Amino acid sequence: MGRKVTRALNSNPMVEMVDIPDIQLYVYRGFLPEADCQILIDKIDEKAEPSSLYKGTEQEGFRTSYSCHLNRWESDIDRIEKRISALMGIDNDYAETMQGQRYQIGQEFKAHHDFFHPAQDYWKQEELRGGQRSWTAMIFLNNVPAGGATEFPHLKIGVRPERGTLLMWNNMAVDGKPNYKSLHSGTPVVEGTKYIITKWYRQNNWVKLTGSG
Ligand SMILES: O=C(O)CCC(=O)C(=O)O
Ligand SMILES: [Fe+2]
């Protein structure tokens, strides 16, 4: 999957590759038009509840945002999701249910990996439900006056929230194993509110394997 995505992104003139050897990280500024950002923000405001972490990995203060699942069978969500997947060259059914997140002042998502840690209990189950989370696609839905950047501490890089910017990175290394350098955080919002969507692609067809969506 990695190679197919790389080919799709490298050949697209709108997509910038961040030139860091330790990770495949891409940015597409102005990907999502304002009207679509607003549609997603409204849905997040309507549905968001305190965010959760995987059972057994909960830690107080680790992920303080509000989040929600976005229903892939709704036409606006379907259209937006498929635009992202088409850009990346991945079948949208490989993606889990897209999540919307909202961070108010002081809220954050501390440094974590999006891939499943194979030593954790949940892995045995998730392995059968689509395997690893390979690529992450994330869109900033609004401008945040201060704070709220997505930072990759091992790579010494941060991306400031700007409406419509799509970030994409591979959580796997070139050998197909989890890339520990993909560690990242949503830093605390200092001023304003931050809205994002996150989409995690599995290595196999998640919709088919889980019968859900
Ligand atoms: O809020 C951010 O900038 C990062 C979000 C994130 O890492 C995630 O949802 O997995
Ligand atoms: Fe993440």
Image (cartoon, rainbow, N blue to C red):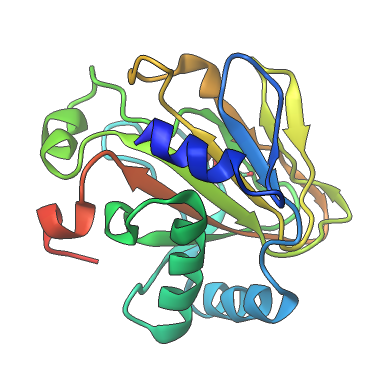
Task: Report which quarter residue 9 is drawn in.
Answer: top right
- Residue at position x 44%, y 58% in the image: 85
Q: Pick whichever, 125 or 107, lies toward us.
A: 125
> What residue appears at the point 70 percent right and 30 percent down from the top-left corner?
18
Q: Toward the viewer: 26 or 149?
A: 26
Q: Quadrant of residue 93?
A: bottom left
Quarter where residue 56 is shown: top left
* Residue farthest to the right, as pictured: 145
Split into quadrants, the picture shows ligand 1 in the one at: top right
Q: Is residue 85 left or right of 144 when viewed as pictured?
A: left
| Residue at horizontal 67 percent and vertical 78 percent from the top | 38
Residue at image coords 15%, 44%: 129
User: Can you say whether 39 is above or below 21 in the image?
Assistant: below
User: Which quadrant holds the N terminus?
Assistant: top left
Q: Is residue 52 above or below residue 26?
A: below
Query: Residue 43 location in percent, x, y?
Result: 53, 78
Q: Position of residue 167 (x, y in %)?
A: 63, 46
The C terminus, quarter of image:
bottom left
Q: Residue 171, relative to residue 21: is it above or below?
A: below
Q: Is residue 61 visible?
A: no
Can you give x and y, in whole percent of width and height, for residue 58 in the image? Answer: 37, 35
Instruction: Say which of 3 and 82 sits in front.
Output: 3
